[in-house]
Image (cartoon, helix red, strand yellow):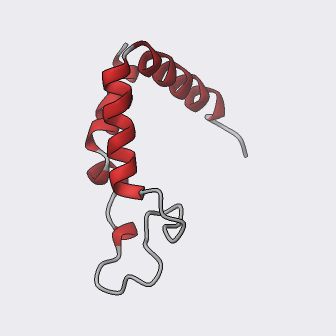
Amino acid sequence: FVAGHETSATTLSWAIYELSKNEKIQEDAFHEIESVFGRNSNTNNAGIVEGDDDKQQGEDDITEKLPFLTSCLNETLRM
């Protein structure tokens, strides 16, 4: 089942294009992603740090974790 793949690809393409035109916005988005997921090899794709029993970071909604990136995507959809 592949319904919707073209719209997702188009949205991401436009978002990446727009980010490439503004270095400051691109850096802000990168730092937000890096702050959530980090560069650690012990962080999996869901943002859960392996062995971290105190807090399950992957349980939160991704839009709450990445408000700036969510805003960038919403602006892309608006255009």
- Whether residue 66 sits left or right of residue 42 in the image: it is left
Q: Position of residue 63 (x, y in %)?
A: 32, 48
Q: Position of residue 40 (x, y in %)?
A: 48, 63
In the rendered image, the vertical position of residue 63 relative to residue 10, given as above or below = below
Residue shown at the point (61%, 34%) measured from the top left: 4
**Is 56 drawn above or below residue 40 in the view shown?**
below
Left or right relative to 4: residue 46: left
- Residue at 43% across, 63% down: 47
Q: In this view, does 74 lie above or below 34?
A: above
Task: Left or right? Give the position of 1 relative to 37.
Answer: right
Judge by depth and name the residue closer to the eye, 78 or 14: 14
Left or right, 67 with reference to 57: left
Q: Which of 59 and 6 is in front in this view?
A: 59
Q: Residue furthest front?
A: 40
* Residue lying at 66% horizontally and 37% vertically, measured from the top left: 3
Quadrant assignment, res 56: bottom left
Task: Name which residue lies at 30% across and 78% down.
Answer: 55
Count of numbered circles in the view: 0
Q: Can residue 55 be seen in this view?
A: yes
User: Dividing the image into 4 quarters, which one contains the C terminus?
Assistant: top left
Picture layout, residue 5 above or below residue 64: above
Residue 75 in view in this figure: no
List x then y, in percent, for residue 7. Answer: 57, 27
